[in-house]
Image (spheres, helix red, strand yellow):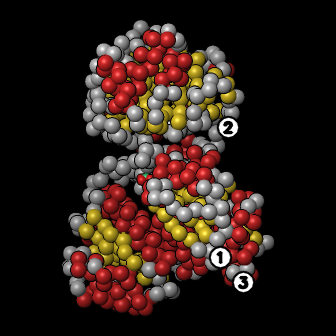
Amino acid sequence: MCGITGYIGYRDAYPIIINGLQRLEYRGYDSAGVVLYDGKQINLSKTKGKVSDLLNKFDAEDAKKGNVGIGHTRWATHGVPNDVNSHPHTSQSGDLVIVHNGIIENYDTIKKELINRGYTFHSDTDTEVLINLIEEVKKNNNVKLGKAVQIALNEVVGAFAIAVFDIEKPDEIVVAKLGSPIAIGIGKDNTEFFIASDASPFLEYTKDAIYLEDEEMAIIKVGRAIEIRKINDDSVVTANVQELQMNLEQIEKGGYDHFMLKEIHEQPRAITDTFRGRLLKDEAIIKMAGIEDNMKRFLNAERILIVACGTSWHAGLVAEYIFEEFARIPVEVEYASEFRYRNPIITEKDIVIAISQSGETADTLAAIKMAKSKGAFVFGVCNVVGSSISRESDAGAYTHAGPEIGVASTKAFTTQITVLTLIALRLARAKGTMSSSDFRMYLHEMELIPNKVEKLLEIDSKVEEIARKYLLSTNFLYLGRGFNFPVALEGALKLKEISYIHAEGYPAAEMKHGPIALIDDRMPVVVIATNKGHYDKVVSNIQEIKSRQGKIIAIVTEGDTVVKEIADHVIEIPDTEEALTPLLTTIPLQLLSYYIAVMRDCNVDQPRNLAKSVTVE
Ligand code: G6P
């Protein structure tokens, strides 16, 4: 985790670095820091807290001076969040400065060696160890900064994205990557360079960017083309300059109070973008290059294993129901963190689908590397183009949700379900497990979903009213069955994440095996009771809750009359096919958690202890 920014060029580095850090706060926000070099000396400011807290340290205009600098926003791994552990860190001599995203696993051994050689440490971080190791290597080998970084990185075990500079040579920044992302923006004629964990900090300055690959480092010097080398064998790498497709509008709030609310409201557009060019209703086909090119493998697959974490894992669970129903392929859904460590049985006939919004989640990445090494074919479903998981996969399909900045995932979830549903439908046709009339009907229904989501978003104020009634509740239960069981899990996760209310998701029929004991007149129970599937059985569950005085918030299909009579609150969704209902039932649950969190005065976009992209184990 953690966000890194840097600038070297002719402009004031301070506003570029500060704005950049604010855009990267989704990656971590427990401390922040900036170091600038003003031509004579460095000015280093850091603090526990958010980037907004860091601004208080810059009362003196002089502290903001300089055309070169690096910054950091942290999600603590080694060492609690406090001022001392915040980045940037300096070396013992004070000459070298570093920001780091990742973990140095063998830092303790290196630290002991450095202590024996006379180094003292002020923080508990692995990063301070790394910068002193670089200094020690530089001194002992009498080499330049780039070479010292390279030698030092060959001694460390772990993951990193780093940016380092030497106040003795302030026209140069050295960056390196293994496991954590780093992008370099290139200004006109190499007159300036931008460094960041993703491209959002420099979108307004340049569209030309290089994403470093694992085990690469770059020496960035004003007025000169970037020099990229392999860390382990020193070979020169040709820079692959890409043109960024993202624009500034996509990463701003656009009039909404929070990114989460903006992203909830973006879902009709995001879902449409995800099936644009793939769902061709008039021709009655689904076209997805990643599937067509590998159709034989999919048709011969004996099993699909889905690996993911968090919300993406919930999308995987929805996909399990959909794949089995439509394409009759057995599916297993695994937490990537468990899967990677438990010696799973994987064969060449398995297809592993990795689902990840960021495409950087460390456990998911490690899980697919392991599956690949055992011969499985890996298919990535990612949102971030060019991310590590998308690159590591044998094939894949992007969700086209656009940048998701709110830490609680919303549009990424519905677009993941959209892509996975398209894949399941395509395979169902290829395998002949779905009739052509059903296939056409599903294409038609899918195409109507964005409008239905749009309509559903109009209930905003109704959900707000319900939220007001339950904002002081300390527990919530979420129930659903079939396709909507994973939605119940996702609804509970959303509430936990952003409002810090304890919530559990359960398959409705399992309630009687435990959770029913929790129900009393203070327990709100959100029940998804759409009119198909197991409707009657869910209605019986609602009766059971009612007889124990639980408060029922029911998600029903419009026109429902039965549940209306029993439930305390009813939210109607437009009618659609049962398998597609998760795309609709999710929306009110997202809104409910959003409004409760706002009313409880929680930081909706940056909930405590969480981060958007978990690039550490
Ligand atoms: C973090 C985020 C979640 C996300 C999960 C998986 O925990 O806070 O919102 O679902 O990581 O992330 P991924 O990028 O792999 O989907």
Q: Looking at this view, name the residue that lies furthest to the right.
A: 283
The local crowd at label 2, few if under 14, some if 14 to 19, many if 20 or more residues have their Cα within 10 Å, is: few
Q: Which mark is residue 327?
A: 1
Could you say whether the residue bearing mark 1 is in a helix, strand or loop?
helix
Could you say whether the residue bearing mark 2 is in a helix, strand or loop?
strand
Q: Looking at this view, name the residue that lies furthest to the left.
A: 521
Which residue is painted at 40% across and 13% down in the image?
95
Give the spatial CA distance, label 2 vs label 1. 38 Å
Say what amino acid the circle numbered 2 marks.
Glu
Give the spatial CA distance, label 3 vs label 1. 11 Å
The foreground one among 186 and 226 is: 226
The local crowd at label 3, few if under 14, some if 14 to 19, many if 20 or more residues have their Cα within 10 Å, is: few
Say what amino acid the circle numbered 3 marks.
Ser
Q: Can see residue 166?
A: yes
Ligand 1 sits in quadrant: bottom left
The local crowd at label 1, few if under 14, some if 14 to 19, many if 20 or more residues have their Cα within 10 Å, is: many
Which residue is painted at 36% across and 71% down in the image?
505
Question: How many numbered marks does the figure carry?
Answer: 3
The percent position of residue 561, horizontal first and vertical second, equals 42, 90
First in residue order: circle 3 vs circle 1:
1
Which residue is painted at 54% across and 63% down in the image?
345
Give the spatial CA distance, label 2 vs label 3. 43 Å
First in residue order: circle 2 vs circle 1:
2
- Image height check: is 156 above or below 439? above
Q: Which mark is residue 435?
A: 3
In the image, taking residue 519 as reference, residue 109 lies left or right, namely right
Which label sits in the foreground, 2 or 3? 3
Which label sits in the foreground, 3 or 1? 1
The percent position of residue 220, horizontal first and vertical second, equals 58, 21
Q: Which mark is residue 243?
A: 2
Badge 3 vs badge 1, beta-carbon distance below 8 Å: no
- Image height check: is 414 above or below 254? below
